[in-house]
Image (spheres, rainbow, N blue to C red):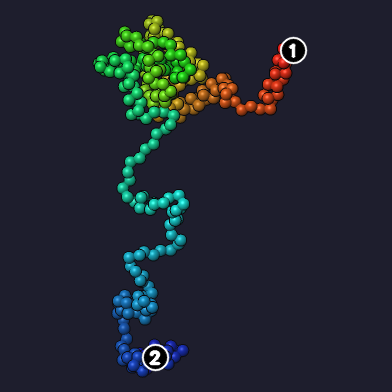
Amino acid sequence: MSYAQDTASEAGDDMFRSPAAAAAGAGTSRETGAEASMRGAGGSSAFQGRKGASALESADTSVGRGWGRGPVPVDRRKYRYDVRRGKTLPALPFSASKSDRMDAEDAGDLLDRIHAAFGINRETEDRIQAFNNALFLEHTLNGASLLQPGRGILKAGGVQFDVQIVKSVLGVDQRRFFRAYADDIAELNKKVLQEFDPMDPESAEIYGQMSQIAVERGLVKFPHLIHDSADAGVTLSNDERNALIASKRYTLRANVNNVDKVPTHNDARMEYEAGVTTQNSQT
């Protein structure tokens, strides 16, 4: 039996072959497994696709294929550009500012304006540093409320400065200005508390005032955080932040702001009864 007859199927494949193909098949010698695999890799396998490529190969080798549904598509409703390309390109630096405080550059410009207003920007660095310490200490003791009349003075290097000039330069940005220096003010408060001298009347007075504020705000454990802008610090620990949150809750609960208070039915009834009582008393 020849090789062509041996490989013929029971269904009779030779019935559908031309005489020339049958003659060629009859003269074909037996191939080894290595030769068949090499011939299949060369693209002349019997499993030839319609476009001439092997069914085991991709028609376009430049396009990768895989299993599954592929990556999640980009929501074109939100992004009108090539998001994937933007992520693959070298990343550019980015940042953002927080609205409750000034940027470092803006705060530095404003502090320089304060120095220029007093004429101390031409002094030596030790005098400028003493003025900044006095400014931060004044904020710790008196806060940054816009309702304050601005009474008081700053003492630095034996020279006195009027606080009202500082208030006029800062304007409505007092809170945002001091919040930019929250960590610096906390460091100064630590230094003032550590250098407390009971034999020095001025040092004892400042220490007593800071202790009073710490007790009123529930910050006895962290007296260096008694300034209004303390919660804007970026170097605070979790314990310090929790203490500041608890202090704010206590302070806000003790001082009710009637402007922001939501009126209730009982409040309206009490106002009505008060008005009726006033009318009866006048008649």
Q: Is residue 45 above or below residue 105?
A: below
Observer-nearest of 129 and 199: 129
**Visible residue check, residue 33:** no
Quadrant of the snapshot with the C terminus: top right
Q: Are marks 2 and 1 in contact (CB under 8 Å)?
A: no
Which residue is denoted by mark 2 in the rendering? 17
Q: Is residue 87 above or below residue 116?
A: below
Residue visible at 36% across and 90% down? 4
Which amino acid, by three-letter code, is at mark 1? Answer: Thr
Residue 176 in the image, given as x and y percentages of width and height = 42, 26
Secondary structure under tag 1 reads loop
Quarter of the image for residue 256 reads top right
The label number, if any, that marks residue 101 in the structure image: none
Residue visible at 42% across and 90% down? 16
Which residue is denoted by mark 1 in the rendering? 283
Residue visible at 45% across and 12% down? 209
Secondary structure under tag 2 reads loop
Observer-nearest of 273 and 250: 273
Mark 2 or mark 1: name the one nearer the start of the chain.
Answer: 2
Q: Is residue 226 left or right of residue 46?
A: right
**Visible residue check, residue 100:** yes
Residue 142 in the image, given as x and y percentages of width and height = 45, 15
Which residue of the protein is positioned furthest toward the front in this rendering?
283
